Amino acid sequence: MKPKQIRELQVSSSQLALIFLALLGVAVIIFLLGVSIGKKYGEAQLEAAREKTSALSEAKTLAEKPSMEKKAEPAHEAEKITPPEKPLQMEKTEPEQMKLAESLPVKKAEKPEKSEPPPPAKITPGAKSAQPGTRVYYVQIAAFSRKEASASLIQELKKAGYEPIILDPFPADKKPLYRVRIGPFKSEAEAEAARNRVRALIPEASRAFLIR
C-alpha cells in the first residue's frame, strides 16, 4: 500500500487579510439585512396597533351616540316646577334656629367695655294699624336662648331696612327662647318675599319661616 501524501496549504498574510475582509463584509451585509427586516416588521406591527385602536374608538363613539340621544330626550321632563315650601312648624324649626345661632360667632359691639343689653326693637307701623281679627303674617328670623346673642342679628336686620321684634319666652317653652321676628305683613306673598330677601342678605336668617 502506498502511504498517503499530506499536502500543506500555505497561505500568505495578504491572502489571510483578504479572507478576513470578505468574511467581515458578509457579516455586515447580513446585519444590515436583519436591521431592515426588523424595522419593517416593527412598522407593520405599529400600523396594525393603530388601526386596532382607531377601530375600537370608532366603535365606542357609535355605541355612546344612542345612549346620549336617549338621555337628551327626557331632559325637559326633569325640569318640573317644584311646589313652594310649606312653612315649617314652630316646634321643629325653633330648636334648629337656636343651634344655628349659638354656633355662629357673636359679633363684638363697638364699645366692648359696656356690655349693655340690646334696646327693645320697635314695632313696625303696620303692627299698630293691625286691627284685631285681621289675619297678618310675621317672619320669624331666629330664636336664641340668650337675649344678648341676638344683638348682631338685630343690627343686620336694621341695616336691611326692617324693624325687628324680640319676643320674651312663652310660658309653654321647655327652654327659654327669645324669638326675633319682622312684620306684620298683610299678605302671605309679601311675607314670603321678605323671608326670601332676609335669607339672601343675612346668613344667620337661613332658617327663617312664616308665622300667622
Image (cartoon, rainbow, N blue to C red):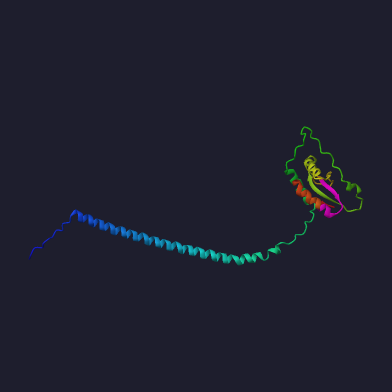
Of residue 133 and residue 49, the one placed in the foreground of this image is 49
Residue in the image at 31% along x and 57% along y: 28
Does 124 appear above or below 83? above
The residues colored magenta run 180-192
Residue 99 is at least partly visible in this image = no
Residue 5, image x, y percentages: 11, 62
Image quarter where the N terminus lies is bottom left
Of residue 163 and residue 119, the one placed in the foreground of this image is 163
Give the residue furthest to the top. 113
Whether residue 11 sits left or right of residue 67 in the image: it is left
Of residue 147 and residue 165, the one placed in the foreground of this image is 165
Does 198 appear above or below 37? above
Whether residue 76 sits left or right of residue 160 in the image: it is left
Residue 180, image x, y percentages: 81, 45
Give the residue furthest to the left. 1
Residue 32, image x, y percentages: 34, 59
